Image: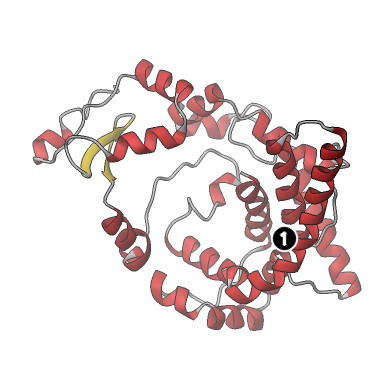
């Protein structure tokens, strides 16, 4: 089954590397880091552009920086499709890096204004405020002469920034590591092990979709915790009429037709680059919730 396409690239006369065995692939993933794997892929003797395999599926590896820039930036509208991983999780399956076609255009155009240079400058003060906690943690450890857990410290800093800039929610991950918001995100990543990852890659899509959330390794929000948090914040903002300069507010505004048109004008350059998108279909409530949850996990990761 795995070797049914082994002669795919040879028949087409394309330089290629042999498909690695499943056990060798598992060994490499378990023992090598991602940076080493990527570096190895770009220095193959067959060249910087060659045929390879993802399991038994043929794919093209591009290691030429100039060509990559054209594919990912300049001519991105010509290469809009990517690997599709429908795993049965409504959050994972609606990640902007996975969806294609009109769904991708609609989501991409909506979230683009959240990352303009103006909005990034506005979020600068939020990041600086969260950075004060990092300085305090470093100071306390220096006074006591204790080593610093850099991974834990910057993980907490990242979570504080995400919570405040994306949702307008104040947390202190350094002094309150058991905060439910923080704990839920960390649990999702600590439980995502290599065996679970390999299972999600090798298992057929129909099987993943049949698995309950508690057993599906690709479910990010197993108990709907983040969805519930987001719904409560939205409800409170609507009741009070308060608005914030954050990612959540942007997606709330996208529910209204006028705000939708404004977003399209703000993202004009992005729309030209990535292709047109229909402006008469505002994001559904479901898709908006998924986009916010994905933002949390992608940013923390």
Q: Quadrant of residue 17?
A: top left
Residue 140 seen in the current view: yes
Q: Check disc 1 and report the residue beneath it.
A: 166
Residue 10 x/y as whole percent? 11, 34
Q: Nearer the viewer, residue 122 or 103?
A: 122
**211 horizontally vs 207: left or right:** right
Q: Nearer the viewer, residue 250 or 166?
A: 166
Quadrant of the drawing holding the C terminus: top right
Instruction: Determine whether the residue tagged by mark 1 lies in a helix, strand or loop.
Output: helix
Residue 173 seen in the current view: no
Q: Quadrant of residue 275?
A: bottom left
Count up the numbered dots: 1
> What is the basis of the colouring in this image?
secondary structure
Taking the view exactly as shown, the residue that stands out farthest to the right is 240
Quadrant of the drawing holding the N terminus: top left
Q: Is residue 69 above or below residue 213?
A: below
**194 horizontally vs 286: left or right:** left
Q: Is residue 103 above or below residue 150?
A: below
Residue 110 x/y as whole percent? 58, 69
In percent of the image, x 63 and y 51: which residue is there? Answer: 299
Taking the view exactly as shown, the residue that stands out farthest to the top is 23
Q: Quadrant of residue 123?
A: bottom right
Residue 149 x/y as whole percent? 73, 34
Q: Is residue 275 above or below residue 89?
A: below
In percent of the image, x 79 and y 71: which residue is there? Answer: 244
CA neighbours of label 1 inside 10 A, class few (<14), some (14 to 19), many (20+): many
Residue 196 x/y as whole percent? 56, 25
């Amino acid at each position: 089954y795995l070797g049914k396409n082994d002669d795919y690239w040879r028949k087409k006369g394309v330089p290629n590397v042999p498909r690695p065995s499943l056990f060798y692939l598992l060994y490499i993933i378990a023992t090598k880091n991602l940076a080493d794997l990527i570096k190895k892929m770009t220095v193959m003797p067959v060249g910087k552009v060659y045929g390879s395999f993802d399991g038994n599926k043929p794919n093209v590896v591009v290691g030429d920086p100039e060509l990559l820039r054209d594919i990912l930036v300049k001519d991105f509208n010509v290469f809009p499709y990517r690997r599709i991983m429908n795993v049965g999780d409504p959050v994972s399956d609606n990640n902007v890096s996975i969806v294609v076609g009109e769904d991708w255009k609609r989501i991409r155009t909506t979230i683009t204004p959240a990352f303009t240079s103006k909005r990034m400058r506005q979020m600068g003060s939020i990041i600086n405020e969260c950075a004060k906690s990092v300085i305090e943690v470093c100071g306390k450890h220096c006074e006591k002469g204790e080593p610093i857990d850099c991974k834990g410290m910057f993980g907490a800093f990242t979570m504080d920034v995400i919570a405040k800039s994306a949702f307008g929610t104040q947390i202190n991950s350094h002094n309150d590591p058991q905060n439910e918001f923080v704990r839920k995100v960390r649990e999702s990543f600590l439980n995502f092990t290599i065996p679970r990852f390999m299972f999600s890659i090798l298992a057929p899509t129909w099987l993943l979709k049949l698995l309950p959330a508690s057993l599906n390794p690709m479910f990010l929000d197993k108990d709907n915790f983040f969805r519930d948090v987001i719904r409560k914040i939205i409800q409170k903002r609507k009741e009070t009429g308060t608005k914030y300069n954050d990612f959540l507010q942007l997606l709330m505004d996208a529910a209204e037709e006028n705000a939708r048109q404004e977003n399209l004008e703000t993202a004009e350059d992005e729309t030209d680059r990535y292709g047109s998108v229909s402006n008469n279909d505002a994001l559904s409530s479901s898709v908006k919730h998924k986009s916010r949850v994905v933002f949390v996990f992608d940013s923390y990761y």
